[in-house]
Amino acid sequence: MTNENSKSSGEISKNIQFIEHVNLLLTDLLYPSESDEPIEPVTCYLHQAEPLTVSQIKDWLMLPPSVYVEEIPEADFWAPVATDQDWYDDDEKARTAKFGQLKQVLEIELTVRQVFQVGESDMDVYVLGRQEDGERVGIKTKIIQT
């Protein structure tokens, strides 16, 4: 039996470790927008050292040219969810703390982090970065803005 997948077992286990670690933080964590949406880990087969381009993201997701994709600053993704406000209740403060932990894990485990929005009002949002072995992984959620 041949293995068509070119990944070594070390690369696969790194991805699994990342996904398991992140999944612990994602339990009951929803990204707030006009609807609260779940967050899930993702893997990406694009392995080059350079930052990804919008064109590569469209190819990876097999999107038609008509679908709008843009890269946004990583801070724009985290600002609404990782910053406490004076008026937050205990649940909102707990959510902010969980997002802070998730942000910290991504900052520690991933380099060359990038955030891509796919769509215009009902957007899939990907935070992708490189692990030390070169594999790209990250998280995905949905943001709805009308």
Image: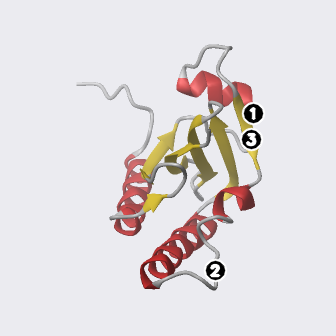
Residue 58 percent coordinates (x, y): 63, 24
> In the image, which disc is placed on residue 85?
2
In this rendering, position of residue 132 left or right of residue 40: right
Q: Residues within 10 Å of mark 1 (few under 14, many from 20)?
A: some
**Amino acid of disc 1:** Thr
Eye-nearest disc, 2 or 3: 2
Instruction: Find numbered disc 1 in the image and state the secondary structure of the residue it sits on.
Output: loop
Identity of the residue furthest to the left in this view: 1
> In the image, which disc is placed on residue 110?
none
Instruction: Find numbered disc 3 in the image and state the secondary structure of the residue it sits on.
Output: strand
* Labels 1 and 3 touching (C-beta < 8 A): no
In this rendering, position of residue 142 left or right of residue 66: left
Residue 83 percent coordinates (x, y): 64, 75
Q: CA gap, disc 2 to disc 3? A: 27 Å
> In the image, which disc is placed on residue 71?
3
Q: Which residue is mark 1?
A: 53
Of pointers 2 and 3, the one earlier in the residue sequence: 3
Instruction: Find numbered disc 2 in the image and state the secondary structure of the residue it sits on.
Output: loop
Res 3 → quadrant? top left
Residue 121 percent coordinates (x, y): 62, 35
Eye-nearest disc, 1 or 3: 3
**Amino acid of disc 3:** Glu
Residue in the foreground of this view, choosing between 51 and 77: 77
